[in-house]
């Protein structure tokens, strides 16, 4: 599925209409912090898995 410039602009326009320009930075900040937490959780899980392998 290829998205060109017109499709991206239409999607961006719809997002602005739905959420409003003032709420978009808050949504982006929330998305960024949840991605950061998710990545940290993945790294912690890998670290725990390596420690479990060493103990067995």
Image (tube, rainbow, N blue to C red):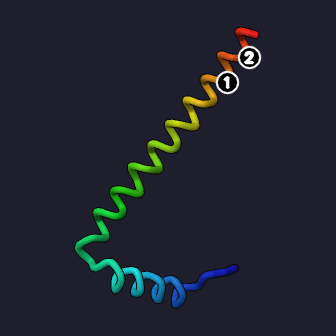
**Which quadrant of the view contains residue 56?**
top right
* As drawn, 6 above or below 3: below
| Percent of width and height locating residue 2 | 67, 80
| Percent of width and height locating residue 4 | 58, 85
State the residue at coordinates (40%, 80%): 15
Please tell me whether mark 2 sits on a helix, a strand or a loop: helix
Count neighbours of disc 2 (C-alpha within 10 A) and say few if under 14, some if 14 to 19, many if 20 or more: few
* As drawn, 6 above or below 40: below
- The residue under label 2 is 53
Question: How far is disc 2 from disc 1 in space, using C-alphas?
Answer: 6 Å
* As drawn, 53 above or below 17: above
Image side of residue 20 versus residue 15, left or right = left
Image side of residue 45 versus residue 33, left or right = right
| Percent of width and height locating residue 54 | 72, 11
Res 49 label: 1
**Which quadrant of the view contains residue 12?**
bottom left
State the residue at coordinates (67%, 24%): 49
Res 1 label: none
| Percent of width and height locating residue 6 | 52, 90
State the residue at coordinates (60%, 24%): 47
Q: Are the residues flagged by discs 2 and 1 in contact, CB closer than 8 Å?
A: yes
Q: Residue furthest left?
A: 22
State the residue at coordinates (40%, 53%): 32
Please tell me whether mark 1 sits on a helix, a strand or a loop: helix
Q: Residue furthest top?
A: 55
**Which quadrant of the view contains residue 19?**
bottom left
* As drawn, 41 above or below 23: above
Q: Residue furthest right?
A: 56
Count neighbours of disc 1 (C-alpha within 10 A) and say few if under 14, some if 14 to 19, many if 20 or more: few
């Amino acid at each position: 599925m290829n998205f060109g410039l017109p499709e991206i602009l239409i999607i961006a326009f719809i997002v602005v209409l739905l959420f409003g320009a003032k709420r978009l930075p808050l949504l982006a900040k929330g998305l960024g912090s949840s991605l950061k937490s998710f990545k940290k959780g993945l790294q912690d899980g890998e670290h725990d898995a390596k420690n479990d392998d060493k103990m067995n």
